[in-house]
């Protein structure tokens, strides 16, 4: 990574919320309270608790659903489509991210956030009621629409409501909110799956939606609602970018399908998918992303490489442990649980003020840890290798991810003007999601080519 400098014209004053009573000067100082408070200070407390609750919900869903997924796929006779259950989420979220970026820049993040949380819950219910693997996948796709809307809207909230000096801290809090779900989620999901059935994992999680709705939305309405500059008329939606977003989702889906089929006829959807993806990627990501151009393009590219490689590998780990090493869903999930704590630790490390001067070095170290953990995980396919090897490797990998993911988010907001935070955050998440889809498609193709479906069927028969 090259040294990155703030975008001209971006300063903390432009990113500080409008003056309210909470911003009144301290009686003993001429400095406004908001200028010295932390994320849990009086000015930001309600907002911080609210949006961290949203992330907590997403974290609990990710850890719980990942634990139940192998059992759901087996009962729905969908082991050959296992990767689709993950990639469907990321494929539809690509479109939702672009829509959310434009929506949030023009009308504020409140509406896309509320809509996204609702869609997220509807998708979970649809998957929980599925009678076939394709219906299950459709539910995951609806959930992805909600997740895409939510994640970009949250970045816009951070860019508008928090001054630059405490953004690393709120992003570290996001990572910390994964700790409890990472430990409790697999245990709760595994227990529910084994005692009541996997469907209750999906049907039960939407109950938690009430918490972030009650806490986050009122606080966002007070601090970050409306357009970035109320005095300026909002620009119309960029229909070209929306068409490109549809293209990138459709192209990614076609490539996933082609990789799953593995026959000569699959070359046609693969070619169409590539034809849709190439112009969409060029139009939606910052110029110079592919060649790692200085500044924002290199940040966006690195985010995609880190997130895509790690998530694609992690998606197959529980299935590997259940079908090849005979672990229960609970134990397979718990083997990755420690990663939530180390991810939060990595994010906490990058949030320290004295680490700001070493951000590029932190990111390089983090990427090396991620690469090492992915390389070590498949070793548990060898019977002589203890299964706890995965837990240790993933703990180090998640520590690296905590530093990399939070740092890329900090740098993106640092390089973005307030009115561009939504679009640039969407570009960051598109890089993240597209990399997930493409690498999951590659993994699914390898899984099918090496007889993964037959292995899953054999494991199902043995249960």
Image (tube, rainbow, N blue to C red):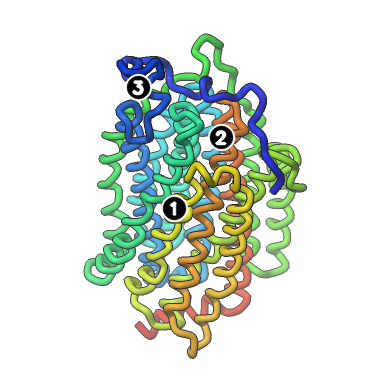
Q: Nearer the viewer, residue 347 or 212?
A: 347
Mark 2 Cα shell of 10 Å, populated few (<14), some (14-19), many (≥20) = many
Sooner in the amino-acid sequence: mark 1 or mark 2? 1
Relative height, residue 15 to residue 320 (above, below): above
Q: Secondary structure at mark 2?
A: helix
Q: Are marks 1 and 2 in contact (CB under 8 Å)?
A: no
Of badges 2 and 3, nearer the viewer stands 2
Mark 3 Cα shell of 10 Å, populated few (<14), some (14-19), many (≥20) = some
- How far from the left and from the top, in percent, is residue 281? 69, 43
Q: Secondary structure at mark 3?
A: helix
Q: Tell me: 50 left or right of 413.
A: left
Q: CA distance from mark 3 to mark 1?
A: 32 Å
Residue at 31%, 38% in the rendered image: 49
**Seen from this angle, which residue lies furthest left?**
195
**Which residue is label 1 attached to?**
140
**Which residue is label 3 attached to?**
222
**Seen from this angle, which residue lies furthest bottom?**
384
Relative height, residue 418 to residue 21 (above, below): below
Q: Secondary structure at mark 1?
A: helix
**Which residue is label 2 attached to?**
413
Check the picture and name the quadrant holding the C terminus: bottom left
Q: Is residue 328 visible?
A: yes
Residue at 63%, 64% in the rendered image: 442
- How far from the left and from the top, in percent, is residue 214? 26, 34
Relative height, residue 305 to residue 97 (above, below): below
Relative height, residue 434 to residue 13 (above, below): below
Q: Nearer the viewer, residue 312 or 193?
A: 312
């Amino acid at each position: 990574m090259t040294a990155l400098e703030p975008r001209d014209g971006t300063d903390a004053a432009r990113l500080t919320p409008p003056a309210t009573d909470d911003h009144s000067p301290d009686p003993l100082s001429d400095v406004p309270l908001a200028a010295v408070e932390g994320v849990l200070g009086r000015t930001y407390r309600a907002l911080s608790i609210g949006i961290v609750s949203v992330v907590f919900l997403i974290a609990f869903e990710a850890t719980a659903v990942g634990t139940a997924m192998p059992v759901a796929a087996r009962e729905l006779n969908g082991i050959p489509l296992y990767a689709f259950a993950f990639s469907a989420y990321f494929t539809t979220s690509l479109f939702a991210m672009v829509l959310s970026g434009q929506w949030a820049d023009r009308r504020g993040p409140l509406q896309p956030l509320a809509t996204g949380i609702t869609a997220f819950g509807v998708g979970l219910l649809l998957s929980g009621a599925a009678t076939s693997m394709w219906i299950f996948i459709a539910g995951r796709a609806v959930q992805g629409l909600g997740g895409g809307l939510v994640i970009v809207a949250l970045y816009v909230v951070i860019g508008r409501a928090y001054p630059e000096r405490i953004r690393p801290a709120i992003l570290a809090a996001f990572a910390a909110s994964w700790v409890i779900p990472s430990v409790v989620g697999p245990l709760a999901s595994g227990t529910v799956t084994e005692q009541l059935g996997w469907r209750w994992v999906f049907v039960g999680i939407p109950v938690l939606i009430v918490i972030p709705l009650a806490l986050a939305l009122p606080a966002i309405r007070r601090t970050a609602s409306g357009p970035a500059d109320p005095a300026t008329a909002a620009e119309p939606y960029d229909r070209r970018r929306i068409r490109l977003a549809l293209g990138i989702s459709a192209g990614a889906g076609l490539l996933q399908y082609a990789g799953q089929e593995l026959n000569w006829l699959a070359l046609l959807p693969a070619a169409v998918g590539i034809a849709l993806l190439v112009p969409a990627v060029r139009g939606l990501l910052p110029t110079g992303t592919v060649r790692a151009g200085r500044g924002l393009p290199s940040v966006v590219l690195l985010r995609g490489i880190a997130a895509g490689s790690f998530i694609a590998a992690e998606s197959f780990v529980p299935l590997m442990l259940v079908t090849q090493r005979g672990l229960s869903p609970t134990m397979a999930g718990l083997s990755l649980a420690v990663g939530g704590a180390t991810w939060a630790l990595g994010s906490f490390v990058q949030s320290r003020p004295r680490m700001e001067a070493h951000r590029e070095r932190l990111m390089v170290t983090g990427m090396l840890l991620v690469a090492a953990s992915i390389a070590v995980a498949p070793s548990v396919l060898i019977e002589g290798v203890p299964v706890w090897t995965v837990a240790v490797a993933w703990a180090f990998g998640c520590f690296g991810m905590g530093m990399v993911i939070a740092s890329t988010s900090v740098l993106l907001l640092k390089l973005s003007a307030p009115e561009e935070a939504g679009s640039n955050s969407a570009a960051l998440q598109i890089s993240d999601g597209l990399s997930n889809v493409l690498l999951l498609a590659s993994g699914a193709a390898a899984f099918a080519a090496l007889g993964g479906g037959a292995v899953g069927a054999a494991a199902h028969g043995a249960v």
